[in-house]
Image: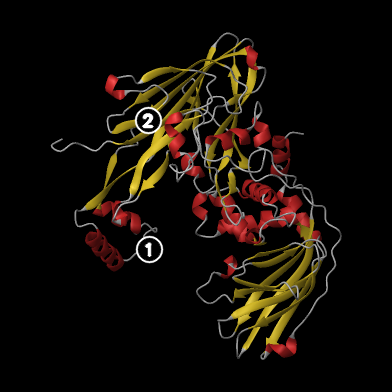
Amino acid sequence: MNPYDLFEAFSRLDDEYIEESNESRKKQSFRLLYALPPAAAMLAAAVILPKVMTAPQMPVSGADGAGAPAAHADETAYEDRTGTWLHVYEGPMLPISISGDPKDLTVERDITFDCSPYTDAWHSIDDIVSEWTDDGGNTSEEEIAAVRNTIENMYPEGGYSSYENALLIHDTYSVISSEDRKAQVYVPFISSYRDLEADIPVLTVNGEEIGYSLEPGRNAYQKADEDGMNIQNYTDWKSYARLIGSGAYENAAAVSDTASIPVKIYRFHDVYSDRNTGMITVDYKKNENSLVLTYGFHAFSSNADTNRYTASFAIPDDYTRKDLSEFYIITTGNGLSSYELFSDQEEGTWSCEVEEYDGELFRIIRQLAEHYLSMPSHQEYNIDPHMFAVSIYDDMTAKGVITDTAIRRYTGMLEINFEDTLSMDRIMFLRTYIDLHKNETAEFKVRYKKKGSYTIELADEWEENRPSMHCYELTPKAGTSLEFAKLSAELTNYQDINITANNFGFDTEQNITSVILDPIKEYYYLEIEKKIPEEGE
């Protein structure tokens, strides 16, 4: 079974099967109703869990678990700027992979860098007002007038100018097969779940747009400091090349083992306070070698000497959507040896129902991932909850959360891990199929906008800070087994840019905008900046 088979197996899980599992779980539900002071009504409950099956730990990045320093291979022009010049790294452009023996294919590849998005766009006062008040018509005329007044004061010149730090890429593969066959094609691209909708490519065959399935790849982040207290996206193309592997994209797109890991789940719900305010705190003690995860809580404390921990959440008030307020504690191993609830509410009454039941770690992550994506701030991303949960689980395994070997920042709150998976870059894949006919050319095109990597040139005034230049990188052979009979590149709509450096061979001053490339070269780069009109132009 390859990783894609594993992913598809989980994708085919029927909702009825999941519901059946939910109905068969053993429930231990009870209600805690306190008349203050709460000290007279504390409750402790002992729970025992069977021995857990732990998932294998995976490296955070690459084969050696650490990304290479930011570098530009053998490009000596950049040696003195290594590791410093690209503060925001967007990753290289990667080649496709086609199933079957590559020796049965003749493939020519042509890449067009269309610079038309890299032009100034004027944002008028009306445009900005419309953007700021676009809430489905719920903004009153008085509120719109107040917003307009604010914006007019911000932009006395009547608006502002901006440009997109992206090029439109046309990556075209002319494929001739020595036999008739249906070929599976993997199309990799670098994005995050947060930016997925903007980054996803359009695929065409012989000019006709075709469908695809979207599949998650391995995360693309590494330790940001020696202590590993934070993580960051990759900062160089070599890390992506290592991640995607050699000869088979499936290796990079592997999904971690989502085998059944038993957990004890504590759900805190139907929270009530006659004062409509305050905090509820769960004071608990965990057993040795147990992993404790929380969801929905707002504050935490711990005492390593006594092995006691607290997790608190604000009592939902009249302004809080109750259906979005979910509070869970999830434990592996021997679970919690004891716990008790109390509130900081000084008078009045409050209540909270606690439901205890057995479950499986991946299933509860899948359930909470769907809840997380249902929040108003996340609905705009239109993410498939199951695919998102698979990536969360994979990322948590890679960071050591599942095996409780991660640094403290990444244990405990599930939301931190969810946010990482939402925001951090990864290699995504589009999988599709094309019909190849013997000795006939099939033109397979991948079209997308590619953001440029950049650094910021600091100015005296913050509003004047802007990227000084953008870099676009190509790794022609990273991960693919295809052998290109010809590799070429073209630059179009370049009138508003200056080329500051490149190893493609482009030279707009000499009208060299179409070049033939070395198909076995590891790395190409194009660095550009916005052309500043000379005085009088």
Q: Which mark is residue 138?
A: 1
Q: Residue at x 60, y 60 (%)?
A: 415
Is residue 3 shown above or below 232?
above
Element assignment for label 2: strand
Is residue 381 shown above or below 242?
below
Foreground tag (2 vs 1): 2
**Image quadrant of residue 463?**
bottom left
Amino acid identity at mark 2: Ala
Which residue lies under the disc numbered 2? Answer: 501
Horizontal and vertical percent position of residue 34? 69, 86
Classify residue 394 as left or right of residue 430. right
Q: How many other residues sit within 10 Å of disc 2, few (<14), some (14-19) or many (≥20)?
A: some
Amino acid identity at mark 1: Asn
Q: Is residue 338 visible?
A: yes
Judging depth in this view, the residue of 144 and 337 nearest the camera is 337
Picture quarter with the C terminus:
top left
Q: Is residue 449 visible?
A: no
Q: Residue at x 39, y 38 (%)?
A: 470
Judging depth in this view, the residue of 88 and 260 nearest the camera is 88
